[in-house]
Amino acid sequence: MDTVNFMDEELIRDPFTAFSRIRERGPLARCAIPGIEQPVWLVTRYDDVKLVLNDPRFVNDPANVPGAGADNMAAQMLQARGVPPEYNKYLLEGILAFDGADHLRLRRLVSRTFTARRVLELRPRMEEITEKLLDRLPEAAEDGVVDLLEHFAYPLPIIVICELVGVPEEDHSLWREWSRTLVSSYGPSFAEAVRDMVAYIQELIGRRRAEPTGDLVSGLIQAQEEDGDRLSDTEMVTMIMTLVVAGHETTAHLIGNGTAALLTHPDQLALLLSDLALTPRAVHELLRWCGPALAVRMRYATEDVEVGGETVRRGEAVMPSLVAANYDPRMFGDPRRLDITRVPDGRRETHVAFSHGMHYCLGAALARQESEVAFEALLRRFPGLSLAVDGDDLERDLNPGAWRLKALPVKL
Ligand code: HEM
């Protein structure tokens, strides 16, 4: 079996084609990832990806593999990124690193304050922020061209998540820079961003402890202080960091990728413009077609498990490929076709862009609502929106785990 090079240029440039090719060669592929010593199994078929994400025989924490445990590949990757070990606890012990009861406990605690109702209540404020950003777009244009990523797709989610968490407006730009650094850079700037974020959150917690408000930090403190389950200080810092970073970049790139997809598919754009009530269905399809998360964190087998007719041995790592699953013709007819009416009732989510199972994205409802508000307002305000460059010339921030644009130059 050939080993797939995760940093292969072709794979990064066009993951949709490359992963489909890998998937059709067989259900599992050996994959080499820089910074990680052992090869990893890449899981590519829709049913197998869902199985791995939902099966308790696969765990996120390598220490939960019986016997000697498995090598911690996330730790190896951090080391390769030059992070001093004292920050490992904030980066390696977030909610995504836990399994079973330990994970459920954290998820329950944060879900108490980050509720579906809270997300719904945010909608009017989201609409207000969106309108304000759109008001300012014309003045940001130079020679009639504006970078929609910089002036709309990025600011909207950072403002929303910072307001939700309780970060004051004057510090939003700090958070934007930190979370950008965390997802894209290596070495000293990465370590510095982690250090500064941790210090900031610790201070914010101190302030809210003295004077609670209605924000999420205050809610988490309250959950921390109630009897029974408790979040430790480290858990709180890690949770807030996870929420801001996970809630910012991903949503920004869904709005960016989704807008680019619509602008390069005039039939779909015209359909949506003719009936903006289709937006929730369009968001589901855009998540499948160009969702920003291409893969998820590695899982480790706690025993020998059969996947797609092959055996993953105890202690081995697997990486479910969301992009391969979302383009699997066994699940989605004509998968390369963008069809905003693909989801029959706009409710049943079939794609795995938000993962699946225990670690299904905690912010999915927020991200969907935010994208719906963004697309609807953008198209209502600028129905003649068009790309300022050829679709093939859009520059991508190439990364094997994420599908991101560098910029989105448009004419209003
Ligand atoms: C988990 C994608 C927006 C918070 C995940 C996972 C994926 C994902 C794929 C699971 C990773 C895994 O299974 O290893 C996305 C995408 C988004 C988005 C594509 C936007 C388009 C958000 C937002 C928030 C958020 C807005 C918070 C405000 C989280 C958290 C987890 C998570 C806390 C961990 C859940 C757990 O371990 O139980 N997300 N996300 N995400 N996401 Fe999102």
Image: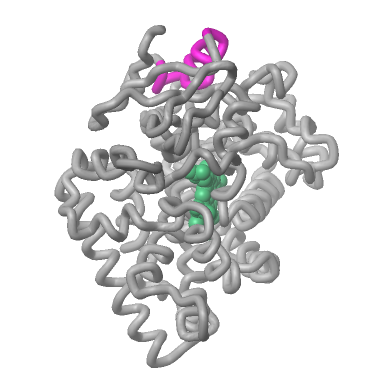
Q: Residue at x 18, y 54 (%)?
A: 85
> Compared with residue 214, is residue 233 higher up or lower down, i.e. above or below?
above
Q: Quadrant of the C terminus?
A: top right
Quadrant hosting residue 93: bottom left
Residue occupying the point 39% across, 28% down:
400
Residue 144 at least partly seen: no
Quarter-wise, where is residue 130 in the image?
bottom right
Residue depicted at 25% across the width and 58% down the height: 194
x and y percentages locating residue 386 in the rendered image:
59, 33
Magenta stretch contains residue 19: yes
Say if residue 33 shows up in the picture.
Answer: yes
Residue interval drawn in magenta: 11-25
**Predominant SS along the magenta part:** helix
87 lies above or below 79: below
Observer-nearest of 64 and 223:
64
Q: Residue furthest front?
A: 67
Which quadrant is home to the N terminus?
top left
| Position of residue 2 measured from the top left corner of the image (x, y, whole percent) | 38, 8
Residue at the spot 73% in from the left edge and 27% down from the top edge: 339
Direction from residue 130 to residue 340 in the image, left or right:
right
Q: Nearer the viewer, residue 98 or 265?
A: 98
Q: Position of residue 219 (x, y in %)?
A: 52, 79
Q: Is residue 376 or residue 61 the one in the foreground?
A: 61
Res 26 quadrant in image? top right
Between residue 57 and residue 2, name the one nearer to us.
Answer: 57
